Image: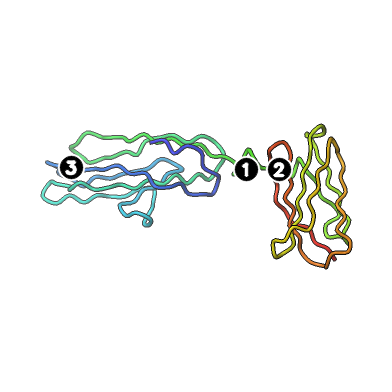
Amino acid sequence: MNFGEEAVGSTSSEQTYTVEGSNLTNDISLIAPAGFNISTTSGSGFNSSLTLTQTGGIIATTTIYVHFEPTEIHSYSGDITHISSGASQVNVSLTGNCSTGISENEITNEEINIYPNPSKGMFKIDIKGHENSSLCVIVNDINGNIILKKLFNNSVSNTIDLTGNSSGIYFLQITIDNKILTTQVVIK
């Protein structure tokens, strides 16, 4: 099972497979590798291991739900092991990658600096790494009304003038090189 990319600290959608057994002399123990959790119930009861109890040597077809829950940024892979004494071990392979959670279409704080914040209405927007690009800034008030829409061409330092607007929180949507940053500024 491949879980693809997941942000650190988040939980993937469930993937499933089934387990069944016959002629068993013991229960089946399932153990998940680091970064993955399993359950017999959709949406709850996830843990790193579980036991399927045999009755009369049989385990009826049981759905196993798997989550990818990375805690560190790296690639994860391993097997869910299925162990029952007297039976052959069965493995289900799992893979997943963990990212920072920053989308490739988002501007990072290292690329842009907005200051002073809070201010009396005058803000500077400095950009790094996009010096020859156009910058589009849309400012919305707390109700979502557009207060300002401005395009800057090939500029490293840009000034936004919101003087004359009421004190409060304003939302900036900044687009540069098809990347977007949404943040807020405060007018005192």
Q: Which x, y percent locates residue 123?
A: 86, 53
Question: Which kind of residue does numbered mark 1 sit on?
Answer: Ile
Residue bearing the label numbered 2: 108
- Give the camera-side residue of 90 and 19: 19
Q: Nearer the viewer, residue 141 or 122?
A: 141
x 24%, y 45%: residue: 28
Residue 120, picture quadrant: bottom right
Pointer 2 or 3: first along the chain: 3
Foreground: disc 2 or disc 3: 2
Give, as a three-letter code, the residue at label 3: Gly
Mark 1, other Cα within 10 Å: few <14 / some 14–19 / many ≥20: few
- Of residue 48 and residue 131, the one placed in the foreground of this image is 131
Tell me the element at label 1.
loop
Mark 2–mark 3 Cα distance, whole angstroms, equals 51 Å
Dot 2 amino acid type: Thr
Q: Is residue 39 left or right of residue 115?
A: left
Q: Which residue is mark 3?
A: 21
* Position of residue 133 measured from the top left corner of the image (x, y, whole percent): 79, 34
Residue 162 in picture, x, y percent from top left: 85, 58
Q: CA distance from mark 1 to mark 3?
A: 43 Å
State the residue in front, 14 or 153: 153
Label 3: how many residues lie within 10 Å, few (<14), some (14-19) or many (20+)? some
The label number, if any, that marks residue 148 in the structure image:
none
Q: Viewer-nearest of labels 1 and 3?
A: 1
Q: Which residue is mark 1?
A: 102
